[in-house]
Amino acid sequence: MIPEWPVPPGVQALVTTRALGDMKSEAGRLRLRALLPAQPVWLRQVHGTGVVDAARASAGTAADASCTRGKNIVCAVMAADCMPVLFADERGSVVGIAHAGWRGLCAGVIEATIAKMGTPASGILAWLGPAIGPGAYEIGAEVRAAFVDREARAAAAFQPTRPGHWSLDLYALARQRLAALGVTRVFGGGLCTASDPARFYSYRRDGASERMAAAIWIS
């Protein structure tokens, strides 16, 4: 899947679907590698806010985001309900990617990624990749409190479902965080992994371990 967003021609990105296979498997990664200019910099994702320079990171580094200014260095994350967020500056001089589940999103992985990119937020474009949508994502009071205690306006991203539970809109929260930073050009955010079993893996739906991947690089 190729993201639709108005980035400079040198910025390349893709998101895998089930058709390419499990990105945790060697076979799936080999199929993905055939579509890329180099081996992706695979991270050991820990649902945190760590961001690395992909040009200097080694495979398996514990982090949930990466960025680069180098050519043909592939930043990548895996997900199966968590939200991949892709970033590029308007000049095409730096790109980044973040793995944003609710924990990382709440802790500030978007903010950390943009800070690491080292370019004004007003010049950054963002694309929100496939993630579990609000119609399929019910959470408990502790998750809502984690966001609302930090920022009262986050309450708008939660809708009550049953006593002590709410639906969570990850996309709305990401847009809030991006807007607060000054990132106004935000695209994507309309694909639900849990409600589209033909295209996407979903941990919440299937309880399975398969993962999709999102990747971005400068050609």
Image (cartoon, helix red, strand yellow):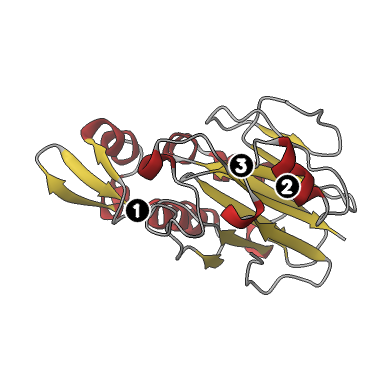
Measured Cα–Cα span from mark 1 to mark 2: 26 Å
Q: Is residue 98 above or below residue 24?
A: below
**Residue 114 appears in the picture as rendered:** no
Sequence-earlier tag: 3 or 1: 3
**Residue 16 appears in the picture as rendered:** yes
Measured Cα–Cα span from mark 2 to mark 3: 20 Å
Query: Splitting the image into 4 quarters, where does residue 14 fall?
Result: bottom right
Q: Nearer the viewer, mark 3 or mark 1?
A: 3
The residue to which callout 3 is attached is 78
Q: Which mark is residue 117?
A: 2
Is residue 206 rendered to the left or right of residue 111?
A: left
Q: Nearer the viewer, mark 2 or mark 3?
A: 3
Disc 3 marks which amino acid? Met
Q: Nearer the viewer, mark 1 or mark 2?
A: 1
Measured Cα–Cα span from mark 3 to mark 1: 20 Å
The residue to which callout 1 is attached is 169
Dot 3 falls on a residue whose secondary structure is: strand
